[in-house]
Amino acid sequence: MGDYVISYRIILTGVGSYLPKNKFSNDSLAKFVDTSDEWISKRSGIRYRHFVSDNETTSEMSYNAAKKAIKNAKISKNNIDLIIVATTTPDNTFPSTATLVQKKLCINAVSFDIQAVCAGFVFALSVAKSMMSDGYYKNCLIIGADSMSKLLDWKDRSTSVLFGDGAGAIILQRVENINDVYKDWGILSSVIHSDGQFYDLLKTNGGVSTNQKTGFIEMVGKEVFKHAVDKLSTSLEEALLSSNKKIEDVDWLVPHQANQRIITAVADRLNFDINKVISTVKYHGNTSAASIPLALDKAISSKTIINGNLIGVHAIGGGLSWGASIIRIGKPKIL
Ligand code: UT7
């Protein structure tokens, strides 16, 4: 008798997000940064961003987003056996923010952080997919959360106007693909890349083992812009190829929300209808690892993205690190 090989699918069943209450318009930023609403809107499409209050932490934002995702997935939190938090702005240098989220949720789950800056969420998707497909972990909570305001140098107007704080979470569930019921559902493909030769294009000027400071963000904006358009497009194409899909099959693109000009340029390059691209950058700026799940939650809660839609997600950040994934949202109705 041959071995019975179980075929698993990793499906996405819940999304949630959280934005801090403190909301800053471009005009309110212009009161303490040498900038204007006109410059920020024209160059980036950003109009608002939210900043954590003094005592608000990345783990708290994560916890708030996680509770909503768990509720939307209609699962018991006790069934979660894996927590991955993608963040560049942990509460403490160690232990991981994920263990704090685990503590707040009062559950038993393997918990750790991933650091791939703005690409953190797509990296977490890839790691979770591998760990779950191996057959051990069944229900994973992925959170993308960042308090980017803590890394901003208010004297640097070229970076300080672009970022915001927030958190987004999703629930992934492992299902057995009996009779091919789940054949075309869940994470169909996931690709990630890094190239450290571009390390200096986007980084903080501090760190634990260099100067024991957290540091501020430094960015060569024009160069990052060019890499972003190129690598977001090629990684999405790679993810499409790997899932045997064409761009025409995609219902919605949910890109990293860094700059509306990048979002538009990528849609042009992929020859994809901009009306089918979810854009929330206007409302919260670049929230790093939180940006894709924040956009996804807004689109799903407004019923723009619905059960069964095929979506493409892609992101790029410091490293440079980038990646993409093709996902069919939800689960078949017959179950
Ligand atoms: O998450 C991934 C990481 N981030 C990104 O994807 C961001 C990638 N880069 C970008 O989005 C764009 O490069 C920026 C939005 C950062 C900048 O846009 P740009 O069109 O490349 O502008 P620039 O850097 O060439 O700046 C043009 C001018 C400069 O003045 P001069 O030298 O032409 O007189 C800047 O000093 O705009 C000036 N400037 C500002 N003026 C008002 C730069 N920042 C500001 C500001 N307000 N906040």
Image (cartoon, rainbow, N blue to C red):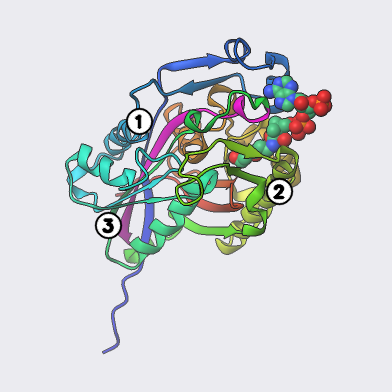
Q: Which residue is mark 2?
A: 227
Q: Which residue is mark 1?
A: 57
Q: Please identify the residue farthest to the front as the structure is shown.
A: 211
**Dominant SS type (magenta):** strand
Q: State if disc 1 and disc 3 touch (CB < 8 Å).
A: no
Q: Nearer the viewer, residue 249 or 165?
A: 165
Q: Which mark is residue 326?
A: none
Residue at 56 percent across and 32 percent down: it is 286
Looking at the image, tell me whether mark 2 or mark 1 is earlier in sequence order: 1
Figure quarter occupied by ligand 1: top right
Q: Which residues are magenta?
A: 158-176
Q: Amino acid at mark 2?
A: His
Label 3: few (<14), some (14–19) or many (≥20) C-alpha neighbours in 10 Å: some
Q: Which residue is mark 3?
A: 138
Q: Is residue 159 magenta?
A: yes
Tell me the quarter of the image containing the N terminus. bottom left
Residue 181 seen in this snapshot: no
Q: Amino acid at mark 3?
A: Lys
Please identify, in this view, whether the residue under mark 2 or under mark 3 is nearer the observer.
2
Helix, strand or loop at mark 1: loop
The answer to which quarter of the image holds residue 31 is top right
The Cα–Cα distance between marks 3 and 1, rounded to whole angstroms, is 28 Å
Could you say where residue 85 lies in the image, as x and y percent from the top left?
A: 37, 46
